[in-house]
């Protein structure tokens, strides 16, 4: 299994750094945001499985030729009250490192999730007190603030929020266009798409590929929401509305405003051509393969 561990370790490192950085710089994701988001999730999940699996496979290598066989030997020995003598300090250390990395990632993910949910709950409570319903769109609340800003608070009790500045700057059609963008975030649960990458970035902020992944995914969910809104509204109306919605949104929210707004406006008014059908499906097959390959390497007898 040591060769399996080596292969998985190399795959994990390649996905975490050069692949992530190249994918973040690539231009084709703007032509297929959904496919790119699937690929990013596969890169993150496949990389995590590979790095954790590498430590696991190396640590258990003395106990068998495959992970299932080695795990069976280990659990049998522990159940009998023994510890396998074949596991020397080097292999035990590899196991502990793998488990430590997994524990670190899961703990950061849980902490990030809990903090985000708490922030959203507090913000939602404030909105229920301070904001007023907008009669032209159900579930939308108006915050009395002069700066034009629109955002959504995801979750089971989601909220769509526009400021008074948005209502002053846009007509009803423009506000509806902005809300169509925000509803796309809510409907497709983009907050859940972003969350694992936030955890990755917090777990290993020194890995530039992971930081690039977080930023790239944030851009892609905005592109995806733009695409959904463009199908429901006039593209010119949507572009004009998004230009007017500047400023910033609370950290717990998803907002249509990003530093790449000008590029998004250009993309709305002049949509890029779709990827060729072959490439479209190749991206999705690659996403499946990036997760299936390390799992197969670990679980095959």
Image: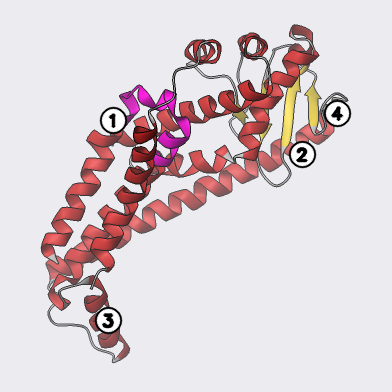
Q: Is most of the magenta stretch helix, strand or loop?
A: helix
The segment highlighted magenta reads 23-40
Residue 158 appears at what percent x and percent y?
71, 40
- Judge left or right: residue 285 versus residue 141: left
Q: Residue 133 carries which label?
A: 4
Frontmost residue, 289 versus 44: 289
Please, is residue 125 above or below residue 261 in the view? below
Instruction: Please report whichever mark, 1 or 3, sits nearer to the chain's N-terminal start.
Output: 1
Residue 189's x, y, as percent?
59, 41
Q: Mark 2 points at which residue?
A: 125
The quadrant of the rendering that contains the C terminus is bottom left
- Residue 31 forms part of the magenta stretch: yes
In the orientation shown, which residue stands out farthest toward the right? 135
Which marked residue is nearer to the observer: mark 2 or mark 4? 4
User: CA separation, marks 4 and 1?
Assistant: 43 Å
Does the magenta portion include 133?
no
State which quadrant residue 170 falls in: top right
Q: Earlier in the sequence, mark 4 or mark 3?
A: 3
The residue that mark 3 highlights is 72
Q: What secondary structure is found at the residue carrying circle 4?
A: strand
Can you say which quadrant of the picture contains the N terminus? bottom left
Q: In this view, does 19 lie to the left or right of 140?
A: left
In this view of the protein, can residue 182 be seen by the observer?
yes
Q: Going 25% across and 80% down the picture, which residue do you hit?
A: 74
Callout 2 secondary element: helix
**Alpha-carbon span between mark 2 and mark 1:** 39 Å
């Amino acid at each position: 299994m040591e060769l399996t561990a080596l292969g998985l370790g190399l795959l994990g490192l390649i996905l975490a750094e050069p692949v992530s950085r190249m994918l973040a710089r690539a231009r084709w994701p703007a032509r297929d945001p959904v496919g790119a988001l699937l690929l990013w999730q596969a890169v993150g999940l496949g990389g995590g499985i590979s790095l954790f699996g590498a430590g696991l496979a190396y640590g258990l290598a003395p106990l068998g030729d495959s992970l299932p066989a080695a795990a069976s030997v280990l659990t049998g020995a522990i159940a009998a009250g023994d510890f396998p003598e074949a596991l020397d300090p080097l292999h035990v250390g590899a196991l502990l490192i793998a488990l430590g990395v997994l524990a670190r990632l899961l703990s950061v993910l849980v902490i990030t999730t809990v903090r985000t949910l708490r922030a959203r709950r507090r913000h939602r409570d404030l909105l229920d007190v301070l904001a007023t319903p907008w009669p032209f769109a159900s579930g939308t609340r108006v915050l009395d603030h002069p700066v034009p800003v629109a955002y959504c608070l995801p979750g089971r009790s989601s909220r769509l929020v526009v400021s008074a500045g948005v209502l002053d700057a846009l007509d009803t059609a423009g506000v509806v266009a902005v809300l169509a963008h925000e509803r796309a975030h809510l409907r497709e649960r983009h907050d859940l798409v972003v969350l694992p990458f936030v955890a990755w970035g917090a777990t290993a902020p020194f890995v530039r590929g992971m930081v690039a992944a977080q930023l790239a995914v944030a851009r892609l969910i905005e592109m995806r929401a733009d695409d959904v809104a463009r199908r429901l509204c006039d593209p010119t109306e949507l572009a004009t509305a998004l230009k007017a919605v500047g400023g910033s949104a609370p950290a717990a929210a998803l907002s249509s405003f990003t530093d790449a707004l000008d590029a998004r406006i250009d993309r709305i008014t002049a949509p890029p051509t779709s990827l060729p059908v072959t490439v479209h499906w190749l991206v999705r097959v690659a996403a499946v393969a990036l997760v299936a390959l390390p799992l197969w390497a670990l679980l095959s007898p």
